[in-house]
Image (tube, rainbow, N blue to C red):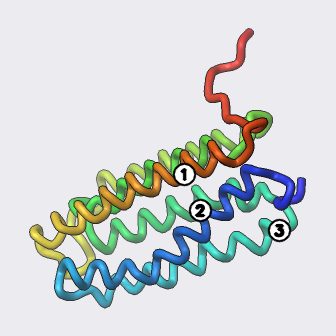
């Protein structure tokens, strides 16, 4: 199916644009909260990874719909390595999980569970491997970043739910298990 015909692909595309357009501002937020943050410029580069999904997504919308939570999970692991687990960047795995569950159609069960599995696997290094940040972030700076990231995750989750709910009334996502 062409990504222009699929309401789930349209929802994923709008999420990609939202994330990509906000990424360049993240270093400014970090600078404002911490007083430094050149290392946060990684988020500008990661915006390109999100935008790169749009090209192949025009030909095959599965790239768009399955790629978004996977790129999000990779980005979350990288951001958590940079800022440390106490910064709350790992919370971005929640919207990645939502997108993995909502972007893929019920007939794409294998792809859905692979995407969900990859996002879940990304939680292991986020939860266990990045206690200390790679960047020069103090505990107070990480606490300030945690607040920023928590509110950002809540806003992103609300947008994801709204966008997939509004995608098409006839294409409502039914997460109930199939009846036997």
Local secondary structure at mark 1: helix
For mark 1, does the 10 Å Cα neighbourhood hold few (<14), some (14 to 19), or many (20 or more) residues? many
SS class of the residue under badge 2? helix
**Residue at figure coordinates x 73%, y 58% from the top left:** 10
* C-alpha distance separating marks 3 and 1: 20 Å
Label located before the other in sequence (3 or 1): 3
Q: Residues within 10 Å of mark 2 (few under 14, many from 20)?
A: many
Residue 139 in the figure: left or right of residue 51: left
Dot 1 and dot 2 residues touching (CB under 8 Å): yes
Q: Residue 46: x percent and y percent? A: 51, 77
**Of the numbered discs in the image, which one, if any, rests on residue 83?**
none
Is residue 148 among the parts visible in the rendering? yes
The residue beneath circle 3 is 58
Q: Nearer the viewer, residue 30 or 128?
A: 30
Q: Residue at x 36, y 54 (%)?
A: 91
Reading the image, the residue beneath label 1 is 160
Q: Is residue 132 above or below residue 23?
A: above
């Amino acid at each position: 199916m062409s990504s222009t015909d699929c309401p789930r692909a349209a929802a994923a595309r709008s999420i990609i644009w939202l994330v990509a357009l906000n990424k360049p501002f993240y270093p400014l937020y970090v600078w404002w909260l911490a007083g430094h943050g050149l290392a946060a410029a990684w988020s500008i580069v990661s915006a390109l990874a999100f935008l790169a999904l749009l090209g192949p997504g025009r030909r095959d919308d599965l790239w768009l719909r399955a790629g978004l939570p996977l790129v999000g999970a990779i980005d979350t692991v990288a951001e958590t390595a940079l800022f440390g687990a106490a910064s709350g960047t790992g919370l971005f795995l929640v919207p990645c999980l939502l997108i993995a569950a909502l972007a893929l159609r019920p007939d794409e069960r294998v792809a859905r569970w692979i995407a969900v599995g990859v996002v879940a696997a990304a939680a292991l290094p986020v939860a266990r491997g990045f206690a200390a940040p790679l960047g020069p972030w103090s505990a107070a700076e990480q606490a300030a970043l945690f607040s920023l990231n928590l509110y950002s995750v809540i806003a992103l989750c609300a947008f994801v739910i709204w966008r997939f709910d509004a995608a098409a009334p006839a294409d409502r996502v039914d997460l109930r298990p199939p009846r036997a």
